[in-house]
Image (cartoon, rainbow, N blue to C red):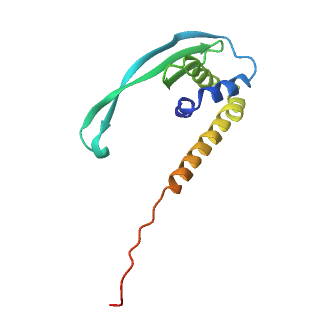
Amino acid sequence: MGLLARARAGDLARLVAGLGDVPAHDWLRPPETGTVMVRGRAGGTGAPFNLGEMTVTRCALRLADGAVGHGHVQGRDKGHARDAALVDALMQGMRAGEVRTKVLCPLVAAETARRMARARRAAATKVEFFTMVRGEE
């Protein structure tokens, strides 16, 4: 679920379209946008405090075979939430292997590449400090 939520909406839509026909589904909860309160802790261990609100979109659907899928994504992209819920539902059925290969594995590879690129950019800004000693002691 986290991978689907972090995926770029366009990438997820393209991969889901690559699965072929989207199975018929009924909405248990059509995509809806709202806000959630984000909480934080000073230093990771301090007392919790309300950091602010974040916009999220969620939905739930049921496939014809009875599998239920849920999607929760940051932002207002209802299509992203629908695609996430659809993948969640498909992973519970006979097409799980296909979905893993055609959707989840490429998303993992893309996320890994983004993280490595970010790490390289951060490493390029690293500054090494050293001290020179005058004379011999």
Residue in the picture at 30% in, 46% down: 43
Q: Nearer the viewer, residue 37 or 132?
A: 132
Which picture quadrant has residue 135? bottom left
Left or right of 40? Residue 27 is: right
Q: Is residue 111 above or below residue 123?
A: above
Left or right of 58? Residue 131 is: left
Extreme-bottom residue of the structure = 137
Which picture quadrant has residue 112? top right
Number of numbered markers: 0
The quarter of the image holding the N terminus is top right
Which picture quadrant has residue 131? bottom left
Q: Position of residue 39 (x, y in %)?
A: 32, 32
Extreme-left residue of the structure = 47
Residue in the picture at 43% in, 22% down: 55
Q: Nearer the viewer, residue 54 or 59?
A: 54
Q: Is residue 122 above or below residue 101?
A: below
Left or right of 128? Residue 68 is: right
Q: Position of residue 24 (x, y in %)?
A: 67, 11
The quarter of the image holding the C terminus is bottom left
Q: Nearer the viewer, residue 14 or 68?
A: 14
Q: Position of residue 16 (x, y in %)?
A: 68, 24
Q: Position of residue 88 (x, y in %)?
A: 59, 25
Residue in the picture at 71% in, 22% down: 17
